[in-house]
Image (spheres, grey):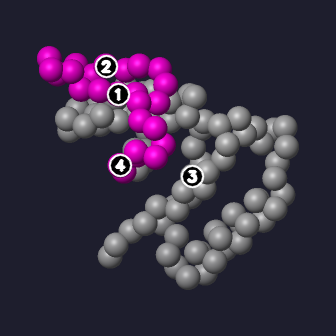
């Protein structure tokens, strides 16, 4: 079965602790409810701001270079992979599995 990613975007300076957008929250809740009722929702998870991203790049010598900040512009993202780990070291190991550039937010 084909899977899709539903991405909800906020401005870069969005801060829910300052002003939560009630209309947006209602719309997101309605979308979640509709997807649950249809049995098509796999999981839901929020992302931290892009400013907190770390970019991972495989080096020719096999090491993984980790730099602060997003590597890719949001319009050029290729895929979304949610590794289940709270440890940066465990998540870093995932990048060894391929020669692609990636970022963790």
Among numbered discs 3 and 2, the one appearing first in the sequence: 3
Among numbered discs 1 and 4, the one appearing first in the sequence: 1
Quarter of the rendering containing residue 91: top left
x and y, in percent, of residue 27 in the image = 73, 67
Quarter of the rendering containing residue 22: bottom right
Q: CA distance from mark 4 to mark 2?
A: 20 Å
Residue located 48% across and 66% down the image: 42
Which element is circle 4 on?
loop
Residue 45's disc is: 3
x and y, in percent, of residue 58 in the image = 24, 26
Which element is circle 2 on?
strand
Among numbered discs 2 and 1, the one appearing first in the sequence: 1
Up/down of 26 relative to 21, above or below: below
Which mark's residue is nearer the viewer, 3 or 4? 4
Crowding at mark 2 (Cα within 10 Å: few <14, some 14-19, many 20+)? few
Evaluate if marks 2 and 1 touch, with contact meaning CB atoms under 8 Å apart.
yes
Residue 78 is a magenta residue: yes
Evaluate if marks 3 and 1 touch, with contact meaning CB atoms under 8 Å apart.
no
Evaluate if marks 4 and 2 touch, with contact meaning CB atoms under 8 Å apart.
no
Which residue in the structure is indicated by mark 1?
A: 56
Which residue in the structure is indicated by mark 2?
A: 65
Magenta stretch: give its range.
55-79
Q: Quadrant of the N terminus?
A: bottom left
Q: CA distance from mark 3 to mark 1?
A: 21 Å
Q: CA distance from mark 2 to mark 1?
A: 6 Å
Crowding at mark 3 (Cα within 10 Å: few <14, some 14-19, many 20+)? few
Residue located 50% across and 75% down the image: 40
Which residue in the structure is indicated by mark 4?
A: 78
């Amino acid at each position: 079965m084909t899977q899709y990613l539903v991405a909800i975007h906020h401005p870069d300076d969005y801060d829910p602790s300052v002003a939560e957008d009630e209309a947006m929250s209602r719309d997101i809740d309605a979308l979640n409810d509709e997807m649950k009722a249809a049995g098509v929702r796999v999981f839901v998870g929020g992302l931290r701001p892009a400013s907190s991203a770390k970019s991972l790049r495989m080096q020719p010598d096999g090491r993984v270079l980790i730099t602060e900040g997003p590597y890719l512009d949001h319009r050029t993202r290729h895929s979304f992979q949610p590794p289940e780990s709270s440890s940066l070291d465990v998540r870093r190991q995932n990048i060894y599995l391929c020669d692609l550039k990636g970022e963790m937010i």
